[in-house]
Image (tube, rainbow, N blue to C red):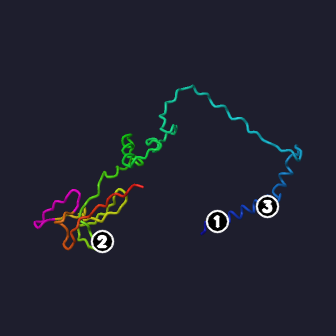
Amino acid sequence: MAYLAIAAGLALAGVLFLLKRSDGAGDAPAKASAPQTAAPNTILTWTPPPLPSQPVMPATPEPAQEASTEGSQDPTRDLSFYVARGEKPTMPEVIDRLHQEGIYSGLGAFNPPGFRPPLVGLAVPEDFVLPPGYVRHYQATDDGQRIEAILMYSPDYQFVDAANQPVAIPKDRVVPPEHAPPGMPIRRIAVPAPTEPR
C-alpha cells in the first residue's frame, strides 16, 4: 500500500512540474539569456557530427552455416529444423530424431512415450489404512490419464521374517499378493488404454 501512495505522489509531482513548465514561468531565465540571432519564425536544427569510420577488416571467409529446411540463417535451431513443413510426426518420432542428432535438452530431455511403462500391482483403496512399511504409489499414463494407486514397499522400512532375518524385496518394490497387509482386498489394477491423439 505504501508503494502505491509513493507512486501516486510522484505522479502528482510530475504533473504539477509539467503544468508549471507549460505556464512559461520556467522559460523566463532562458529567454533572457539566449541571444536573439534568429528570426522569431525560424526553426533551428542541429546535425550531429559524423561517426568515426569503422576500421576496415581484411576479408576472411566466414564458415558456412547449415541452412535449415526453411532456409533460415538463425543459428539457434528449433523444432522446425528437424521436422519438415507439413509433416506431422508423432511425439516418439520427434524425440527419436532429436536423440539421433545428439540433442538431449528441451523436448530431447524426455524419453519417448512408452519407454517406461506403468507398474502393475495391487490396487490400494483410498480409505484403506496402510501399516508401516507400505506406501501407495501413484502413476499416470503417457497421455496423462491417472492410474489407481498400487501397493509398494516403503524404501525406508526393512521387513524381517520370523527368524528376524531381512526379507528379500523385489527390485521394483511392488508388493506381490501373498505379502499384502491383512484385510486389504486383493485386486490388480488395470492400466487404461491410450486416448486418441487430438
Q: Nearer the viewer, residue 140 or 14?
A: 140
Q: Start and end of the magenta stretch?
A: 160-174
Give the mark, 2 or 1, whose residue is nearer the N terminus: 1
Q: Secondary structure at mark 1?
A: helix
How many marks the image carries: the answer is 3
Residue 198 image-quadrant placement: bottom left
Q: Amino acid at mark 1?
A: Ile
Residue to which mark 2 is pinned: 126
Q: Nearer the viewer, residue 139 or 34?
A: 139
How far across and how far down the image is residue 148, in percent?
A: 30, 65
Q: Give the residue at x 44% y 44%.
A: 87
Query: From the image, which quarter does the N terminus lie in?
Result: bottom right
How far across and how far down the image is residue 189, in percent?
A: 26, 64
Q: Secondary structure at mark 3?
A: helix
Q: On the picture, is 32 further left or further right than 156? A: right
- Contact between marks 3 and 1 (CB within 8 A): the answer is no
Q: Nearer the viewer, residue 47 or 27?
A: 47
